[in-house]
Image (cartoon, rainbow, N blue to C red):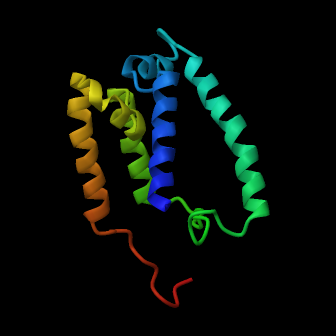
Amino acid sequence: MKQIFALLSGLIFGFGLIVSGMSDPAKVLNFLDLFGTWDPSLAFVMGGAIAVTAPGFAWLTRRRSRPLFDSAFRLPTRTDLDPRLLTGAAIFGVGWGLGGFCPGPALTALPIAATGTLIFVPFMLGGMWLARNTPDLTPTPKKGAA
């Protein structure tokens, strides 16, 4: 049952990306081009998504001790900004700015076989593999050090 709802959620998310235009890299790049052909329409998409999601999420997390199809809510617990997080965020931002895609819209645009998508998705998957399989090189504090 959990997989069925995950699939259904992914399909709804993908449909929303297509309807909103986020699967079109030209639209995304125009949104990021503040001093050129800026297109503010994706800001309205983001605002609408936040307006719908935030109250529902807040209501659910206060009302329920766990989600319907999992044993616990999976919320972030870390609050620090480490070099690995900042580096990953910078690489993500540069890739998004250059390609006009982030992972969700890239996968949504894959069936149309656009040239940019066919280049972006394999590199995205390679980056995900590297992130998962590269050891964490962040130094750990020594015990007793203040």
Q: Is residue 26 above or below residue 91?
A: above
* Residue 88 position in % (x across, y down): 39, 50
Residue in the image at 30% along x and 52% along y = 128
Give the total number of marks visible in the rendering: 0
Choose top left, top right, bottom left or bottom right for residue 14.
Answer: top left
Left or right of 3 in this view: 58: right
Q: Who is closer to the viewer here, 18 or 131?
A: 18
Relative image position of residue 86 (x, y in whole percent): 45, 52
Q: Position of 51 compared to 83: left or right?
A: right
Residue at figure coordinates x 50%, y 20% from the top left: 31
In the image, farthest residue toward the top? 37
Q: Position of residue 74 (x, y in %)?
A: 57, 64
Check the image and report above or below for 100 versus 41: below
At 26% across and 34% down in the image, what residue appears? 120
Q: Nearer the viewer, residue 105 or 143?
A: 105
Observer-nearest of 112 and 50: 112
Residue 65, image quadrant: bottom right
Identify the residue shown where x is 63% and y is 63%.
Answer: 67
Image quadrant in which the C terminus is located = bottom right
Residue at the bottom extreme? 144
